[in-house]
Image (cartoon, rainbow, N blue to C red):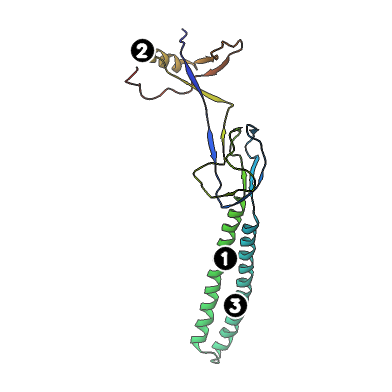
Amino acid sequence: IEIRTIGTVQPIASVQIKSRVDGMLSKVSFNEGDIVKAGTALFTIDPRSYEAQLKQAEANLARDQAQLENARLELKRNQTTASSGVTSQKLLEQARTQVQILEAAIKSEEAAIDVAKVQLSYTDITAPITGRTGDMKVSEGNTIKANDTTPLVTINQLRPIYVTFAVPERELPQIRARQYKAPLAVTVTDDRGVQHPETGTLTFIDNAIDSTTG
C-alpha cells in the first residue's frame, strides 16, 4: 500500500552559534555555506584580556600559598612556645586563625583560576554539530557581545535530515498497525521527479491530529 503526500525538508538539528564572552572577533575560520564537522574551529575572540585575568589569578594564588607557608611556620613556633608558657593562648589562636584564613583564600583563588580558564576557553568557538553554515552576521574586527540576540552564524545538520508530511487521519490506524510489525519505508522525490529518489524510514508520528484539516 502506497500513500502519496507533499512534505517539507527540515534539519534534524539547527544550532545558533553565539559567543559566551565579550571581545573583538580576531579570526573567522570558515566561509559561508561551508560544510563543517563537529569540533571545527569557527571563530576566535581576542584572548589577551582573558589570558591576563588568568595570569593575575595564578599570581594571587602563588602569593597566598607563600603567605600560608609562612603562617604555618608561625603557628608551629607559637605552638612550641605556648607549651612552655612563653606565648599566650590569644596569640596562638590568632596564628591558627590566620592559617585558616589563608587556606580559605587559596580555595577562592583556585576557583578564580578555574573560572578564568573557562572564560579563556570560550574565546575559541567551535562547531557543536556537523552541518552547513549559513549567513555570517559578523566579520573580523567587530566587537561582539556574550549571548547577543543575533547569532554569529547558524549551522543546520543536513545528513541525516528530516522530511515532515501530513496524511489523512483515516490512514493513521493502518500506518500504526504496519509500523508495529516492521519499519515503514519513506521514499522522497522533489517536484521535478528525480530519477534517484532518497529512501528513509518513518521515525515519528505526532501525538495529535490537526482538527482543522484532519
Residue at image location 40% in from the left, 24% down from the top:
206
Q: Residues within 10 Å of mark 1 (few under 14, many from 20)?
A: many
Residue drawn at 63 percent across, 31 percent down: 33
Please, is residue 126 above or below residue 121 in the view?
above
Bin the neighbour count of mark 3 within 10 Å (Cα to Cα): few under 14, some 14-19, many 20 and up. Answer: some
Q: Position of residue 136 (x, y in %)?
A: 59, 38
Query: Which element is circle 3 on?
Result: helix
Residue 54 placed where, x, y %? 62, 61
Nearer mark to the viewer, of 3 and 2 = 2
Q: Which of marks 3 and 2 is nearer the N terminus?
A: 3
Residue 7 x, y percent position in the rendering: 48, 18
Relative to 87, say whether 16 is above or below: above
Q: Which of marks 1 and 3 is nearer the N terminus?
A: 3
Q: Name the residue under label 1.
A: 109
Q: Residue 72 carries which label?
A: 3
Identify the residue at image location x=52%, y=84%: 92
